[in-house]
Amino acid sequence: TIQDAPDVAAEKARFFLAYQAALPATPPKPADPPKWYGPLASKIPAGLPGSSANVALTADLSAARNAFYNTYNAQVAAVAPKSDGPVFAVVPVATSAQWTGPVAATLPAGVPGSSPNVAETADVLNAKNAFFTTYNQQVAAVAPAPKV
């Protein structure tokens, strides 16, 4: 091996001494975060109506909410300056039914027959077969012979 020049050897020794002196003050590596064992996020349908743990509105809750909106709109109308323009009001919403159809994540994507793709015509099939035949012939012509 090639020996270091005296000045390089001295600098390396100085560096390693400084490194060893600073090493005890270095904080230990933080522990790895705990491994997740819960359900996959992709198995939880996000944003589908009825997919969350929200409680359905009861008739009492709907009535109370509508009473609040009506009181709010009345107060806004009482204190808002009058104008000739359109009046905007919060409209109480009706309670709607929850989604009970299939979850999008349970439908197989990309499985043959699962999508509404149009079947290939005889012309397309013949063209594909001609292409792959020509391709395989060209590959065989330039490929090295198999080793036996």
Image: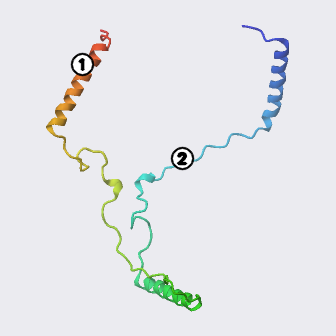
Rendered position, 1 above or below 75: above
x, y percent for residue 33: 59, 46
Few, some or many residues within 10 Å of mark 2 (<14, 14–19, 20+): few
x, y percent for residue 117: 24, 47
Few, some or many residues within 10 Å of mark 1 (<14, 14–19, 20+): few
Q: Write the residue at 52% across / 90% down.
A: 74
x, y percent for residue 67: 48, 88
What amino acid does circle 1 point to? Gln
Q: Write the residue at 32% across / 11% down.
A: 144
What residue sits right under mark 2 in the picture? 35
Mark 1 and mark 2: Cα distance apart in space: 51 Å
> Split into 4 quadrants, where in the image is the N terminus?
top right
Render colour scheme: rainbow
Q: Residue furthest front?
A: 84
x, y percent for residue 108: 30, 49
In the image, is 69 to the left or to the right of 110?
A: right
Q: Quadrant of residue 23?
A: top right
Nearest the viewer among 121 and 35 is 121
What amino acid does circle 2 point to? Lys
User: Which callout, 1 or 2, points at the residue further toward the start of the chain?
Assistant: 2
Q: Write the residue at 43% across / 59% down.
A: 46
Q: Quadrant of residue 139?
A: top left
Residue 137 circle label: 1
Q: Quadrant of residue 94?
A: bottom left
> Split into 4 quadrants, where in the image is the C terminus?
top left
